[in-house]
Image (cartoon, rainbow, N blue to C red):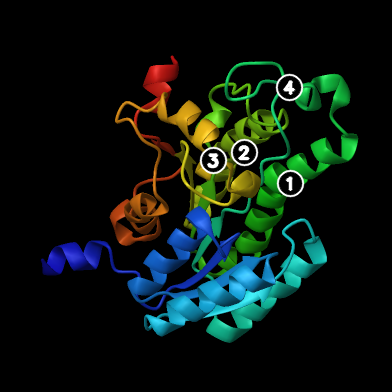
Amino acid sequence: MAALQTMFDVRGLSVIVTGGASGIGKAYAEVMAEHGARVAILDLDPVGLEKTVAAIRAAGGDVSGEVVDVGDRPGMAAAFDRVAERYGKIDVVFANAGIDPGPGFNTPDGTRNPDGAIENIPDEQWDRGIEINLTSVYTTVKLAVKHMKPRGFGRIVVTSSIAALINEAIVGTSYMPAKAAVNHFVRHMAMELGAFGIHVNAILPGPFITNIAGGRLRNKADREAFERQSLIGRIGDPEEIKGLALYLASPAASYVTGSLIVIDGGALLRIT
């Protein structure tokens, strides 16, 4: 047991989680705090952020919150600097923030959705989807490396998606290419940064119950459309991603970098 505890020991690590006020990001923040890490959550939602920070503190966790839009590069840089000053270092960064940029060209029942047709997509909707789902990952990794490289140590975990590997007609059009690019970026960063002791990996969730797209998977039709893809007949709960997040942040993953790890209830097998 002692050896196992050492393998997964994250006590004292300084951790940043973007988009950590709810859903998968909240699960990342919770599991790291539960195991003794010092966690800073960056999120655009002040109400959700305050609620999550309060809950983690009530459970005994060392946590702080920063209200910031991950698309705001100066704001992100300032937030990273404040966390580094507060904790003295940045060890682990979860680049998690993401959005569903709008409706897909099909509805869950398979009928065409004019609002999601390519000719009707507002340019600002496309731009925001790329900004948050791809460009913010670049910004987050760039800022993390600034603080990690001088120390010769760092763990970066990016939330991608199985949407990087498939196409989903009921998901906003910019989401899949953004996540596919994220996968390539993660592997490219792993190639560049391994020599500096910085490991970069991606988690590729399938459908989980979160607030993305306004919490659409709480709607019966949307949920059932994704449940039909699962080999185990349901979609995921963010609690079920905690073990993988802890693993990638811990010494247990000391030989893991450039990996794209799928956690999807077997949905990819059903789809292919």
Please tell me which residue is depicted at 74% across the width and 68% down the height of the picture: 77
Q: Give, as a three-letter code, the residue at label 3.
A: Asn
Q: Give, as a three-letter code, the residue at label 2.
A: Val
SS for callout 2 = helix
Q: Give, as a three-letter code, the residue at label 4.
A: Asn
Q: CA distance from mark 3 to mark 1?
A: 29 Å
Q: CA distance from mark 3 to mark 4?
A: 17 Å
**Label 3 vs 2, first from the N-terminus:** 2
Q: Which residue is mark 1?
A: 135
**Label 4 vs 2, first from the N-terminus:** 4
Q: Which residue is mark 2?
A: 182
> Relative to 95, is 65 above or below?
below
Horizontally, residue 250 falls left or right of residue 100, namely: left
Of 147 and 71, nearer the camera is 71
**Label 3 vs 4, first from the N-terminus:** 4
Q: Which residue is mark 3?
A: 219
Marks 3 & 2, CB-CB < 8 Å contact: no
Please tell me which residue is depicted at 64% across the width and 48% down the height of the picture: 214
**Rendered-image quadrant of the N terminus:** bottom left
SS for callout 1 = helix
**Label 3 vs 1, first from the N-terminus:** 1
**Label 1 vs 4, first from the N-terminus:** 4
Q: Crowdedness of circle 1 by 10 Å Cα count: few (<14), some, many (20+)?
A: some
SS for callout 3 = loop
Q: Which mark is residue 113?
A: 4
Q: CA distance from mark 1 to mark 4?
A: 27 Å
> Relative to 75, is 196 above or below?
above
Q: Give, as a three-letter code, the residue at label 1.
A: Thr
